[in-house]
Amino acid sequence: LNLSNPNPVRVQIRSFSSSLSGIRVYLQSISDRTGQSMNPEGSAALGAPLTRRSSGGAVPLILLQPGCVATLQIEVTSPEVPEKAETISTSGYFTLGTDFEKLRTAITFTTLPGNLTFFPPLLRVGLAFPGLIPRKLLVARSTFQVPVTVL
């Protein structure tokens, strides 16, 4: 999720809340108008989950300067699927609050029973150098009832 600040003044993200217990939001990067990375301002650290707080604190979670973009990673942990259930549908939202508004984002997903295993579980690649393309066989086994794409 990219949060852009097109305003001529800075925007302070002061609160983060969610209706889902299994959601985490991570600050991945902050960049300026030219795409150059910037050090984050506020209490949020790069790669760390945002601290949940329902009201604004003295120090903002993220301070977004004019023309800057904050990239957030959203991680959702699904509930366990009971053995007899085929799927579980989950809906909820998370909210980021500024001094002036609350940005509410809906999340809907379906959880299927199954797992994905790989063999070998640990893939080791030997020495490589420019011009040499190492190749290793990796086998995946899925117990899901629908096709799974691995990227």
Image (spheres, rainbow, N blue to C red):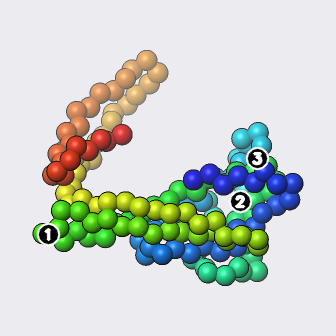
The relative height of residue 83 versus residue 75 in the rendered view (above or below) is below
Foreground residue among 22 and 123:
22
Closer to the N terminus: mark 3 or mark 1? Answer: 3
| Amino acid type, residue under disc 1 in the picture | Glu
Foreground residue among 14 and 95:
95
* Quarter containing the C terminus: top left
Residue 40: image tag: 2
Foreground residue among 89 and 138:
89
Say which of marks 3 and 1 sits in front.
Answer: 1
Closer to the N terminus: mark 3 or mark 2? Answer: 3
Q: Which residue is at a point 37% across and 31% down the rendered structure image?
A: 127
CA gap between label 3 and label 1 equals 49 Å
Q: Which residue is at a point 70% across and 52% down the rendered structure image?
A: 4
Query: Can I make out residue 23 in this image?
Result: yes
Q: Position of residue 31 (x, y in %)?
A: 71, 48
Q: Position of residue 25 (x, y in %)?
A: 53, 64
CA gap between label 1 and label 2 equals 44 Å
CA gap between label 3 and label 2 equals 11 Å
The relative height of residue 91 versus residue 6 in the rendered view (above or below) is below
Residue 32: image tag: 3
Q: Secondary structure at mark 2?
A: loop
| Amino acid type, residue under disc 2 in the picture | Pro
Residue 83: image tag: 1
Query: Can I make out residue 117 in this image?
Result: no
Q: Residues within 10 Å of mark 2 (few under 14, many from 20)?
A: many
Horizontally, residue 126 falls left or right of residue 32, namely left
The relative height of residue 143 versus residue 61 in the rendered view (above or below) is above
| Amino acid type, residue under disc 3 in the picture | Asp
Horizontally, residue 14 falls left or right of residue 76, namely right
- Asked whether the residues under the numbered discs 1 and 2 touch, taking CB atoms below 8 Å apart as contact, a structural biologist would say no
Horizontally, residue 77 falls left or right of residue 49, namely left
